[in-house]
Amino acid sequence: MARVAIVTGGIRGIGEAISVSLHEAGYKVIANYASHDERAKAFSAKTGIAVSKWDVGDFTACQEKVASLSKEHGPIDILVNNAGITRDAPLHKMGYDAWDDVLRVNLSSVFNMSRAVINSMRERGFGRMVNIGSINGQAGQFGQVNYAAAKAGMVGFTKSLALETASKGITVNAIAPGYIDTEMVQSVEQSILSKIIARIPVGRLGHTQEIARAVRFLVSDDAAFITGSTLTINGGQYMA
Ligand code: CAA
């Protein structure tokens, strides 16, 4: 029977590429999204991938959704924590909401979703979790104390949960993408973005599929011995 995967933030950007890649590999994918109903509908119609709307920053919603989706599609074997937002500003201009929103959506969501799937994975002796971090959690980034803190926090979470689950057939890994050609990155002011691209040794933005392919490997049986690691995919921009 096909393994069941949830991809949070799974209808746009890197998440979209991950959902499609896992679907093509034969997994039963549920792509979560938070808004953009029309886009979700079109994505599902085009790809045949199930979509489901909830706020991954809401603990209760995550527990309820995972319970109902497990009933509908089968227990969750694979969780890709990809959902993320930016609210960039230097600290001296950053309001509490910009801090709180980013920590809630980018980091608390990882707790919320992992907590929702962990017992079933432990009982069944199998699970794959991949947390999508960022180069900016490794290197820091002007204007992103919130985002960088959330993404760095994700790495500590990944390592700790990997230790807790290693004997249970569950692997927990992170990927730290560099600047990938997504709407999020394209929303950075073009003059700033050109300077960033000039610092990427490979000389270009990454493609979403270049992250999706790594996720596909990490969730496969071939990657059973890889846990607690962070895979850096950034065109050589930062060598962690
Ligand atoms: N390093 C050093 N100085 C910088 C700087 C940098 N990276 N960026 C801006 N500055 C300087 C400017 O030159 C300017 O200096 P002067 O005042 O001397 O002219 C000053 O800082 C501007 O500071 P402000 O307080 O006025 O900042 P701002 O409010 O105008 O803009 C910002 C701040 C919106 C954060 C802007 O710098 C920015 O967009 N930075 C890019 C942030 C970024 O890379 N975000 C990534 C989004 S994509 C993503 O996150 C995906 C992923 O995982 C990679």
Image (tube, rainbow, N blue to C red):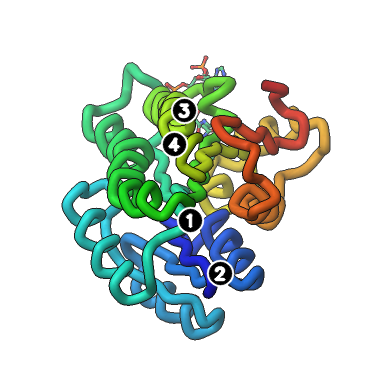
Asked if labels 3 and 2 touch by Cβ distance under 8 angstroms, the answer is no
The numbered mark at residue 163 is: 3
Image coords of residue 203 (percent x, y):
81, 38
Where disc 1 sits, the SS reads strand
Image coords of residue 179 (percent x, y):
64, 40
Q: Nearer the viewer, mark 2 or mark 3?
A: 3
Image coords of residue 7 (percent x, y):
46, 58
- Give neighbour class at mark 3: few <14, some 14-19, many 20+ (Cα, 10 Å): some
- Can residue 226 be seen at all in this image of the molecule? yes
Asked if labels 3 and 4 touch by Cβ distance under 8 angstroms, the answer is yes
Image coords of residue 62 (percent x, y):
25, 54
Q: Nearer the viewer, mark 1 or mark 3?
A: 3
Outermost residue toward the left in this view: 60
Q: Residue at x 54, y 28 (%)?
A: 136
Q: Residue at x 32, y 60 (%)?
A: 34
The numbered mark at residue 78 is: 1
- Occupied quadrant, residue 111: top left
Q: Nearer the viewer, mark 2 or mark 4?
A: 4
Q: Earlier in the sequence, mark 2 or mark 4?
A: 2
Disc 2 designates what residue?
Answer: 27
